[in-house]
């Protein structure tokens, strides 16, 4: 069964295992997310589940089409709507509430979020290029550097790393492991970093990669049979 949910990134912390290993984790407040609409191949041309996140105090903050969807589904208005194309959309129904409990410890997920916007940045900050000479007579400390030869080719090649807009783009980090679930507080603890600043909305979905069984962080206890062979 494919799983997906929306949540808010709260920040980073760390978890200690029984053997003393420190696991850096990102904490996501996931759900609850009600199912607003089901899309089918017969009617819409594709199969998807549309879920909502973050209740709003006033419907005036939403557009009329969004308010109409919530009214039709009989669900309280929410701020965000997102579709997930899952292989098992038929198992969901309008009105079902998706919580963080659909995931469990050890699941591998893909996390999608929007990175922090940094505005117009130079090549050193944007592409991690080298600085120019630091001497006083240089006068060219944080510039782009050489862009092209004078005679051949007498132009700047396409895809040259130049200054420009940095950040504020959608990024997905794949194959991250869930190390803890706190159902009472709707929290998911994901090993490693995830995109976006604290407070941003992220989408957590079951990974699309084929992963090996077992956990990177938690060692499975050896069985007596395996111990006897040794």
Image: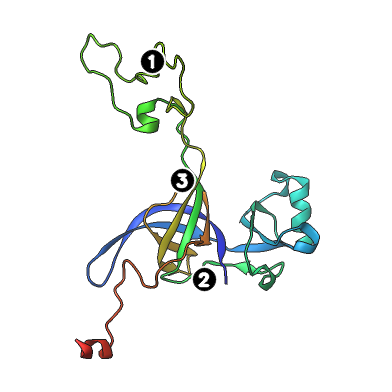
Label 2 residue SS: helix
As rendered, which of 199 and 179 lies closer to the eye?
Answer: 179
Left or right of 104? Residue 88 is: right
Extreme residue toward the front, this view: 152
Mark 1 closeness class: few <14, some 14–19, many ≥20 residues within 10 Å: few
| Residue 225 pos. (x, y %) | 27, 91
As rendered, which of 149 and 21 lies closer to the eye?
Answer: 149
Q: Earlier in the sequence, mark 3 or mark 1?
A: 1
Q: Is residue 200 visible?
A: no
Left or right of 8? Residue 145 is: left
- Asked which quadrant contains residue 16, the reply is bottom left
Residue that numbered label 1 is attached to? 149
Q: Is the residue 195 above or below the residue 151 in the image?
A: below
Which image quarter is the C terminus in?
Answer: bottom left
Q: Earlier in the sequence, mark 1 or mark 2?
A: 2
Q: Residue at x 48, y 69 (%)?
A: 184
Label 1 residue SS: loop
- Asked which quadrant contains residue 73, the reply is bottom right
Residue that numbered label 2 is attached to? 101
Q: Is the residue 63 above or below the residue 143 in the image?
A: below
Mark 3 closeness class: few <14, some 14–19, many ≥20 residues within 10 Å: many
Q: Residue at x 53, y 61 (%)?
A: 205
Mark 2 closeness class: few <14, some 14–19, many ≥20 residues within 10 Å: some
Q: Is residue 177 visible?
A: yes
Residue that numbered label 3 is attached to? 196
| Residue 74 pos. (x, y %) | 76, 63
As rendered, which of 62 and 213 lies closer to the eye?
Answer: 213
Q: Is the residue 1 above or below the residue 127 in the image?
A: below
Q: Earlier in the sequence, mark 2 or mark 3?
A: 2
Left or right of 122? Residue 57 is: right
């Amino acid at each position: 069964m494919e799983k997906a949910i929306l949540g808010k990134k709260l920040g980073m912390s760390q978890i200690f295992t029984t053997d003393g290993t420190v696991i850096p984790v990102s904490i996501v407040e996931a759900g609850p997310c009600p199912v607003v609409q089901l899309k089918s191949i017969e009617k819409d041309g594709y199969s998807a589940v549309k879920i909502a996140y973050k209740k709003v105090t006033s419907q005036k903050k939403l557009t009329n089409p969004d308010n109409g969807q919530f009214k039709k589904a009989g669900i309280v208005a929410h701020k965000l709507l997102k579709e997930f194309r899952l292989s098992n959309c038929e198992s969901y129904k309008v009105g079902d509430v998706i919580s963080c409990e659909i995931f469990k410890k050890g699941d591998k997920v893909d996390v999608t979020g929007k990175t922090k916007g940094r505005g117009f940045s130079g090549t050193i900050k944007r592409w991690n290029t080298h600085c120019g000479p630091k001497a006083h007579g240089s006068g060219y400390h944080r510039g782009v550097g050489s862009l092209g030869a004078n005679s051949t080719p007498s132009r700047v090649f396409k895809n040259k790393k130049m200054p420009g807009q940095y950040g504020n783009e959608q990024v997905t980090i794949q194959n991250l492991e869930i190390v803890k679930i706190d159902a009472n507080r709707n929290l998911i603890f994901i090993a490693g970093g995830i995109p976006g600043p604290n407070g941003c909305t992220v989408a957590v979905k079951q990974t699309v990669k084929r992963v090996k069984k077992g956990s990177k962080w938690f060692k499975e206890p050896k069985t007596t049979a395996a111990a006897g062979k040794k």
